[in-house]
Image (cartoon, coloured by chain):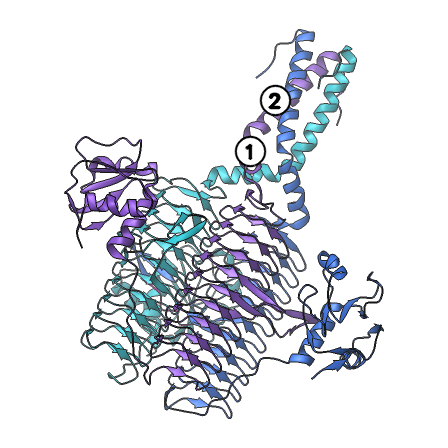
Chain colours: A blue, B cyan, C purple
Amino acid sequence: MPHTLSQVCETLRRNGISPELVGDPNREIRGVATLEDACDGEIAFLSNPKYEKALQTTRAAAVVVKLDADAPDGMNLIRVSDPYAAITVMIVELYGYRRHRRVPPGPGAFIHPSARVGPNATIHPGATIDEDVVIGADATIYPGCYVGPRTHIGDRVLLFPNVVIYDDTRIGDRVTIHAGSVIGEDGLGYAPVGGKWIKIPQIGTVEIGDDVEIGSNCSIDRATLGRTRIGSGTKFSNLIAIGHGTQIGAHCLFVAQVGLAGSVSVGDHVTMAGQAGIVGHIRIGDNATVGAKAGVTNNVPDGQTVLGQPAIPIRDMRRQVALIGRLPEMNETIRKLEKRIAELESQLGASPRQ
Amino acid sequence: MPHTLSQVCETLRRNGISPELVGDPNREIRGVATLEDACDGEIAFLSNPKYEKALQTTRAAAVVVKLDADAPDGMNLIRVSDPYAAITVMIVELYGYRRHRRVPPGPGAFIHPSARVGPNATIHPGATIDEDVVIGADATIYPGCYVGPRTHIGDRVLLFPNVVIYDDTRIGDRVTIHAGSVIGEDGLGYAPVGGKWIKIPQIGTVEIGDDVEIGSNCSIDRATLGRTRIGSGTKFSNLIAIGHGTQIGAHCLFVAQVGLAGSVSVGDHVTMAGQAGIVGHIRIGDNATVGAKAGVTNNVPDGQTVLGQPAIPIRDMRRQVALIGRLPEMNETIRKLEKRIAELESQLGASPRQ
Amino acid sequence: MPHTLSQVCETLRRNGISPELVGDPNREIRGVATLEDACDGEIAFLSNPKYEKALQTTRAAAVVVKLDADAPDGMNLIRVSDPYAAITVMIVELYGYRRHRRVPPGPGAFIHPSARVGPNATIHPGATIDEDVVIGADATIYPGCYVGPRTHIGDRVLLFPNVVIYDDTRIGDRVTIHAGSVIGEDGLGYAPVGGKWIKIPQIGTVEIGDDVEIGSNCSIDRATLGRTRIGSGTKFSNLIAIGHGTQIGAHCLFVAQVGLAGSVSVGDHVTMAGQAGIVGHIRIGDNATVGAKAGVTNNVPDGQTVLGQPAIPIRDMRRQVALIGRLPEMNETIRKLEKRIAELESQLGASPRQ
């Protein structure tokens, strides 16, 4: 398990990273920690310049830094172009991913006789697999999960405890869904009739691509008609709400508490920061970024970053915020100008106009 | 199961809608889909003008449109005054509502001997019914639900998986609660004593009227004293937080991630758009509308629509947003005026005033 | 169970409160209710001046009011300096805290043989206790809870139904977690490699101090490295998201739907109002207050109250809101000034400048 710094560098090279080692190549590394927490034997990293000061006081055995970073003399360093990528490789190497306890099929899980469970899948006691469900190979389904009728779940899918998946959902391979998330519940689909809301049966479904990760306590509505879609490789944090019929592209990143209304179309590689909200029936282009708490009410072109409520391009929003901050001054200036004009008017004998 | 267009029109008439059929009355309809997804044999609809273009390319067998809508020649049309209401009727007719698997009473459900379960109710394995609970006739309680002591649940109530209902809650008839929602947890009730928070026992309850539908992963606090109330016919989307002692009227519609603090009073037929927030101890009048992301800090009169943070009447907010957008221009104008005044002052030999 | 008003005053005195009784000392009190709901035999209180009018119409047997409050003649009153604290004492005295049904160890709970469960702990059927877990004495774990490998749970901890605690979490004594909350899920930790997101194993943990109460449907990320920490005595409402590695102090109060990004540092006695959001890597000082819906993007000094998006000190924000409200007027003034200047310029024969 322990690696020397030169072995660590070898691992980085195998992963396409070119490290430059400064210091003792035989120093042993037993773990990875933050600059602040690292004890002797642990390697830390510095990526965000906010934490530069911690470099002076860290007890880390070595630190991964940028190629041109300043560092105290005598410190063991691994210099790389992207310390964050390098530390990711080291965490994977030294720790690997979470391992899941296998359980043999047993009486505690409720598996409908019509369901088909793939080879080597683990269904924990306390999980429910309903009619005509298909579960892929090597899937892990924790206690308290419910998988509704006719849902298909791909290979190596991981459902943490208490995930609920409604009927007719399709989930790709290698998808992870964290505890308490709900996929495929009915959206807010009602028609107003005589002052009451008549429920519209939500006959659409949800389709989740491969390699998606969904955080905990998220809610993804099924479509009224057709499909709500989450593209392959997209990652969600927690407490995210996705409305019915919304289509999200591949490799997006959504931070906690983001909310999208229904029938939104989101491109690929879109980032949405925390608590952003998107109204229904608009398009967010590829590679767009939506800032924290933004309220987006219009289409966002490819590549654009928007911020504010209503959201506008970030440069305009920054200018707007700066000007709003200067409102007291502007107001004061206007009052002074009024006085100076009144003065001029009285000098000229002009009658002030309202 | 297949219906001809003339049979579809007959169904609409039975539901109080007057259709005008253009095209082939014998055309067979097998399903309902969006304009974009519809294949031959499916009927689609056009209600939101945003989707007018899709009318040119749809492969739908027929389209439900407004009475005066333009449409390509040769297309089968059903013209109605409200296409959304008409398509609702068709979805109900062609698909009906979700059907729930019945399970006989069995050993997997934990039902306290003191609980009373109504005729034909289904309690799935993995659900827990605690002491002195009363469950109505034809109720369906999915796995992982927990119903706390002394709670009353009406007839035909539907609890999707992992719904948690705390003690002493009252839930009316035909209520649906989606997966992961929690009803009756303690609110944030603490008294500050010596720099610590002392918990106030939350001895109140929650009362939910008939025909309410609650989305997934919502949290509705019990009252400290008295009752938190959700009026009959009100519909919630997902991830909504309701504070202790708040009273919500009938036939309201709340979009995802709305949050109401405690002791709010909400009238009937109120709409709250996504991520809106309401401070405690205020009144939102009947038929009021709260815009997306609005932060409401004052009473809202009946029928008013508010928007913004702090929320103000929507017309004022639109004007405000427009003026904020014009701040760069206003700022520029002020600078020009300053120069022109300085010019005038120098012409008049006046000394500029600060 | 019934107390006379003089016995109630005695109880208050035992709790360090000095009451002044006006009226009948032998009047019997059977319960506590709001001014609006109280029936004969119940005691109510008036703390928030918004409810003064209800004093005229209440049917309460007695009312707890401030020392100098006005009240109708002939009403039984208990005058105290802090009615809210007094009513807390009375609720505790008359009702106590929720009592939890004990269940003997039985076959319905899934307890891994390597787990150690403390004396007198109740693990309900339908709960899962995984490998090497330690559960303290007198803990109560409701159905549907999942406690992951190697997690330690203190004495007298209370987990309401469907709480999920991931591996290696540490939870102090007397902690309460409400239904559906998730502790220790992976945060949004990915490194971008070749247009895809590579998952960084989240090898850190979560540590929750003593006497913490967490509302329902909250999500608290484990740290990437090190620990996410919630300090002793801190109280959360519902649907709160805490990012990986964030550190929260003692005796804080967070209202519903608050969201903190990762690596935030929050001091002691901090209040965050509903739907507030905090960006990553900043510090919120001791005794700071973050207003409802605030979007905090910079450090907040000790004791400061901030509001708005981006958040600024509350006094500045109030001034800003007032000035924004006056924008129509400012705009109008600018236009008038323009005209007056043009007039002056024409009088002087000056050519207007752009």
Q: Chain of mark 1?
A: C
Is B18 or B148 nearer to us in this picture?
Answer: B148
The local crowd at label 2, few if under 14, some if 14 to 19, many if 20 or more residues have their Cα within 10 Å, is some
Provide the residue span drawn in magenta. Answer: A199-203
Asked if marks 2 and 1 fall on the same chain, the answer is yes
Q: Secondary structure at mark 2?
A: helix
Location of residue B215 in the rendering, given as x and y in whole percent from the top left corner: 38, 64
Q: Which residue was labeled with disc 2? A: C336
Residue C195 visible? The answer is no
Q: Residue furthest top?
A: A349
Q: Which residue was labeled with disc 1? A: C319
Q: Is residue B68 above or below residue C190?
A: above
Q: Which residue sits at x=38%, y=40%?
A: B299
Q: Given this view, does label 2 or label 1 mark the residue nearer the observer?
A: 1
Location of residue A216 in the rendering, given as x and y in whole percent from the top left corner: 49, 69
Residue C332 visible? The answer is yes
Q: Is residue B203 above or below residue A24?
A: above
Location of residue C301 in the rendering, given as x and y in whole percent from the top left corner: 60, 45
Is A132 or B154 nearer to us in this picture?
Answer: B154
- Circle 2: residue type: Lys
Residue A183 sits in which quadrant? Answer: bottom left
- Circle 1: residue type: Arg
